[in-house]
Amino acid sequence: MRLTILIPALSVLLSSVTAFPSYAGLDKIDYSAFLEKAAKIKGGEELIKRGTPNNGNTGFEQRTLHALIDPASFKYNEKEQYVDLTSDEHKFIPPGANDIRGPCPGLNLLANHGYLNRNGVTNLYQAIDAISRVFGVELDLGLALSAYATVFNGNILDLTWSIGGPYQSQGLGKLTDILLGTPGGINAHNIYEGDASIVRQDYYQPGADHDNVLMHLPYFQDLLDLGNNDQTEGKDVYTAELMLQHKSNRWHQSVATNPLFFNSAFGGLVVTTAAERFVAEFAANNTADENGYNRLYLDEKNLLAFFSVERTAQGLKYTPGHEKLLPSWHRRPLGATFGLDDIVLTLLHAASIDPSLLSVGGNAGKVNTFTGVDVGNLTGGLYNVETLVKDPQALACYLYQIGIEQLVPTQINVLYKVTGQALDFVGKFLAAPWQKLATAGGNPCDSFNSNIAQQYSKYPGSKIERNGQTGVLSTLLDGLTGGLVRKRRRSVAK
């Protein structure tokens, strides 16, 4: 009896909350550079010009993959590019016993330096501001990433989310606990976090014990080996090209070791593939070249600090959650932002190194059984793989359709009991930047019925795992249904 009264009351309460305003600033995003680059690629421009390895070189010494707004086109300005990393407010402080840290080294270090709340619980706006101020992330990308974390790993009522595991919402946001259970944070597998990451084991990988958060040092050593273990200070060893080659290596490694390997459109393509590029761009230091222009480089010294690793006489030592930036580190030029369009081009460059990296799909329950969804069937013949790798605008539309527009409402219906607020949030915060990019320059971005959620359900590794505690409403329903609701929420096909 109490349950039947509780649900309608909550529905009325949530629907009475003021609708989310649209996010200001997206109308100022300029995609002219993206459209110009797209035209060149469609005209046959080569994506990556890799050098020939010789004399101990890796073949990736010269960066040919640059952001659309190339940092090297700006004069280096030490004052403007300075980031406070040493004041009482922003000096490195390791996390305390109750502070949350998670799988993303960039978010961990932002909390360790006080640009995000040091307890590891941030919010939609703080996260956008922090990654813009420190890393130079453009508004559209910052909004897309933070909004996704808020709606699927956090709390849309107080706009908070955790950079790691579960947390308790405060104030008005506690209502979400009644509806959804404790927000799970970005540790939750197959929502934000995905397989074949840079240095972490897969959640379902045999022997990993569901540890998808802590670094697996052998994978980090593989990355150092790819850079020939070059310890030369100031040398640009870990270029974007090298990092994407590392992504290819990790992708095939996961397929060969994880029988439940799964690569989704968002967690797989956008997050784990883009993460390799994020390291090359955001962990990199910036200084002046011989002509006074900006020189971006990522040497081992800065890489180790970013991943909380140090070399010792006994070998590599990893200290979980102690990621940081060195005091000498400087950000990219203020005008050289890195945006959502750069993510699309990153995926094209990744596919030019290894076409597998543009595949959505998974293993069939045994290792080395990967099958990808057929792009032609998925899009009703509108696109095929050949189209996507030669047309950035087509790829932007494809990602928007299968990763956001057609999949997210299905996920909302599964994870939320009252969907109106969540769908309103998605439309104004998450879908908006993707749609703006997908339709830039008048691109029609024709819709297609992909049935992407049904496609995902074919893969046993596509289950969503939320590690948060069960909330009040779920507990009540669980008692009445013998656990069916809890099982449905904690393990569903994405």
Image (tube, rainbow, N blue to C red):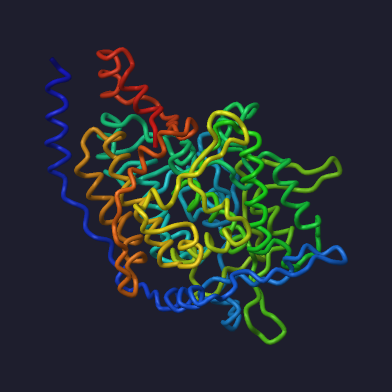
Residue 139: image quadrant is bottom left
Q: Residue at x 46, y 36 (%)?
A: 188
The front one of 304 and 374 is 374
On the picture, is 112 further left or further right than 168?
Answer: right
Question: Which x, y percent locates residue 271?
Answer: 50, 51
Q: List the single residue furthest toward the bottom.
A: 291
| 59 vs 71: above or below | above
The front one of 95 and 427 is 427
Q: Residue at x 64, y 51 (%)?
A: 248
Question: Which x, y percent locates residue 392?
Answer: 45, 67
Question: Which x, y percent locates residue 375?
Answer: 43, 51
| 29 vs 433: above or below | below
Residue 234: image quadrant is bottom right
On the picture, is 3 further left or further right than 277?
Answer: left
Q: How many marks?
A: 0
Question: Which x, y percent locates residue 419?
Answer: 22, 40
Q: Residue at x 54, y 32 (%)?
A: 260
| 209 vs 381: above or below | above
The front one of 41 and 190 is 41
Quick check: can you spot residue 302?
yes
| The C terminus - image quarter | top left
Residue 79: image quadrant is bottom right
| The N terminus - image quarter | top left
Quick check: can you spot residue 86?
no
The front one of 16 and 113 is 16
On the picture, is 398 further left or further right than 259?
Answer: left
